């Protein structure tokens, strides 16, 4: 699987070029700091390019944060999915 991803660089570049479509969207980002494929350098790039992102890092997790953390993510998802409160 990983080898096949290495051959898809053009596809990843195309996705990155279309990121403007997401710039005004709220993004929840769960990042495992022990991810050997998507390193902290990528995290910083994403945070810089998506200013409306809510980032949660997990020091003891790798690439598959939901599988590694499980139910402990529920409060994070609930908080992110709360309806927007309109200020009067």
Image (cartoon, rainbow, N blue to C red):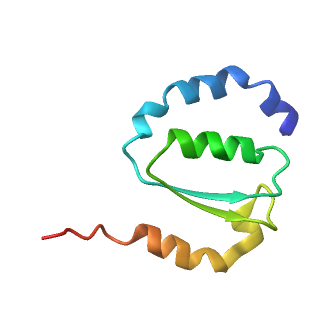
Q: What is the number of callouts on the image?
A: 0
Q: Position of residue 41 (x, y in %)?
A: 73, 41
In this view, the residue in front, 75 or 5, is: 75
Corner quadrant of residue 64: bottom right
- Which residue is depicted at the point 81% across and 29% down? 6
In this view, the residue in front, 83 or 56, is: 56
Name, please, the residue furthest toward the top. 10
Q: Which quadrant would the C terminus be assigned to in this image? A: bottom left
Please determine whether, in this image, residue 75 is positioned above or below residue 32: below
Corner quadrant of residue 79: bottom left
Horizontal side, residue 27 vs residue 1: left or right: left
Q: Position of residue 54 (x, y in %)?
A: 51, 59
Name, please, the residue furthest toward the left. 88
- Which residue is depicted at the point 69% across and 66% down? 66
Q: Position of residue 61 (x, y in %)?
A: 79, 64
Q: Position of residue 21 (x, y in %)?
A: 41, 34
Please determine whether, in this image, residue 71 is positioned above or below residue 86: below
């Amino acid at each position: 699987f990983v080898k096949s991803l290495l051959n898809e660089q053009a596809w990843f570049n195309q996705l990155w070029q279309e990121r403007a479509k997401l710039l005004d969207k709220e993004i929840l980002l769960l990042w495992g700091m022990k991810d050997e494929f998507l390193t902290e350098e990528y995290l910083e790039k994403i945070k810089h390019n998506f200013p409306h992102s809510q980032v949660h890092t997990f020091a003891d997790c790798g690439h598959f944060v939901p599988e590694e953390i499980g139910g402990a993510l529920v409060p994070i998802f609930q908080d992110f999915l709360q309806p927007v409160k309109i200020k009067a």
